[in-house]
Amino acid sequence: MTLEVGATLPDANMVTLGANGPETVDLADKLKGRKVVLFALPGAYTGPCSTIHLPSFIKVMGQLRDKGVDEVICVAVNDPFTLAAWGKDTGATEAGITLLGDADGSFTKTLGMDFTAPHLGLIGRSNRYALVLEDGVITAAKVDDPGVCDISTGEHLLAAM
């Protein structure tokens, strides 16, 4: 699949850490009838993900809400326990960002956004991208080249809205 304006995001089951442990989240249900920003990154606690990418969305949360965004979702090929801890440690959870795990990487692979960098210990991870979705349809898309954190930041996506 190509992440481009007009394309519909495929359905997927994600995982999050709920009050009673891991919970499955149907992505299509989360997107239905809503304006959502969804961005993906290689993984929790990794360098640019923790210092550039995630913080860029925390920084513009208010402006995204002013543009009518109902929810901001961060997807990573991680387990829900790691994502919950990372959300707490970075302030993303407090800022209102929903962290969803594509634990087996199947959603990432379906999108054609998977990459592997064994020298970094990253196997089957997600390339960086950011999307604005209205009822699951892409209305804005910013996709970085692998290994780069540039155009898929919160500021760049906000400017494209």
Image: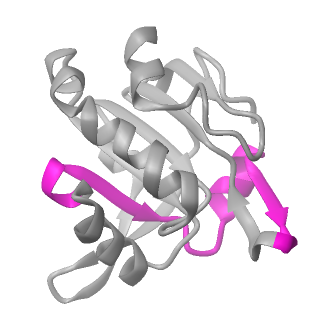
Magenta region: 93-119
Asked if 29 appears above or below 155 in the picture, the reply is below
Q: Residue 117's spot in the image, x, y percent?
A: 83, 65
Q: Is residue 133 left or right of residue 5?
A: left
Q: How is the image coloured?
A: one colour
Q: Residue 88's spot in the image, x, y percent?
A: 23, 69
Query: Does residue 16 appear in the picture of this structure?
Result: no
Q: Residue 12's spot in the image, x, y percent?
A: 53, 57
Task: Look at the image and say whether residue 131 sits in the magenta stretch.
Answer: no
Quadrant in the picture for the N terminus: top right
Q: Is residue 130 left or right of residue 15?
A: right
Figure quadrant of residue 89: bottom left
Q: Residue 154's spot in the image, x, y percent?
A: 40, 30
Is 112 or 92 nearer to us in this picture? Answer: 92
Figure quadrant of residue 42: bottom right
> In percent of the image, x 24 and y 24: which residue is there?
64
Task: Look at the image and say whether residue 102 sits in the magenta stretch.
Answer: yes
Is 14 or 88 nearer to us in this picture? Answer: 88
Quadrant in the picture for the C terminus: top left
**Farthest residue, direction bottom:** 20
Is 56 or 142 nearer to us in this picture? Answer: 56
Query: Does residue 79 appear in the picture of this structure?
Result: yes
